[in-house]
Image (spheres, rainbow, N blue to C red):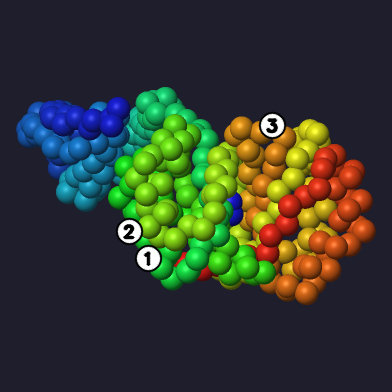
Amino acid sequence: MITSERGHGWYPLECNESDSLTTTRDGSQHSGTESRSARIQLLTAIPAGGATASFQLSVFFRTYTLQFHFFGRSHHPEEDDLNRTHIRETMKLKILSAGTCLALLATFVIAGCQGKSEETASEDPVAEKTEAYFLVAGHPVTDFDAWKAGYEAGDSLREANGLSHIGLFRVDEDSNYVWVMLAAVSLEGAHAFTESDELKQGMEEAGVAGEPRMIFMRQLRDTGLGEDTANRLLISHSVADVEAWTEVFDAHAPARSEAGLIDMGIMEDTETEGMIYLMFGVTDADAARAFIASDDLKTAMETAGVTGEPVISWVHVAD
């Protein structure tokens, strides 16, 4: 404008239920040798730590249910108390074990996610900052409508040289003087386009009535604002130091805004050092014209190091 995906493994696990201490009706105790052996395969897509924790919790609740609800109470309270104490201790151990597994699992998952993020960031290509170039052409025409038809017919020639249409403007004081703004993929392509015989022939046939002015620019700033304004202000001037000028220009922004001007973009000439081009959207033509003629602006430009007389052009969009 001048404007590791981390794979989840399958973990089959098998275990035997631990023997339970039981009490028979005649008072004798024996180990639960008749407890059945269970093979458990967990076909889940979770890491091994998660499978282990889930398995231990499952076994814990099954043991609790079997020992308290299936065997029931015996006729010997003292022995019942002993059984319950044994079960409670077993429960504590299993809860601790399962909790440890879950804590470790959480640690590994968090570390894995962080590692994956860092890995992804390192693999992402670094977007190289590329410069934006523009070709701006200004010239008088004998008949605007006839010229515009000829201009639009030259799209293929512009595209072949890496150029694309950005904007078309007519000067307020002379509607037959036009400015065309083109985005350029490269300066080489822009120069090749302006030097081509096809362009010269096309301009003659379209009715260009004078020597065109071709300006090759590099974009310094694009605010993305003011695109919907029909009226624009174009200013060009040279400066002693671009950085020093920019500081004063930015500090003076409130005054421009109050005068109905929208900062749209800043360009610099690629062939003339220190030559700056500005475009503004105009929301209040009277206030803007008064501002341009003010002593306040003159003082600001002197402070910023503007050298020579600025060239000012009031234009309107003609697309």
Mark 1 or mark 3, earlier in chain: 1
Which numbered dot is residue 273? 3
> Residue 302: x, y in percent?
89, 45
Disc 3 residue type (three-letter): Glu
Read off the residue under disc 1.
149
- Would you say the residues marked 3 and 2 are in contact, meaning their CB atoms lie under 8 Å apart? no
Which numbered dot is residue 153? 2
The image quadrant of residue 114 is top left
Give me the residue at 40% from left, 60% from top: 206
Give me the residue at 91% from left, 57% from top: 296
Tell me if residue 72 comes above or below residue 28 in the rendering: below
Q: Nearer the viewer, mark 1 or mark 3?
A: 1
Give me the residue at 58% from left, 69% from top: 175
Mark 3 or mark 2, earlier in chain: 2
Give me the residue at 46% from left, 36% from top: 191
- Would you say the residues marked 1 and 2 are in contact, meaning their CB atoms lie under 8 Å apart? yes
Disc 2 residue type (three-letter): Ala
Q: CA distance from mark 1 to mark 3?
A: 36 Å
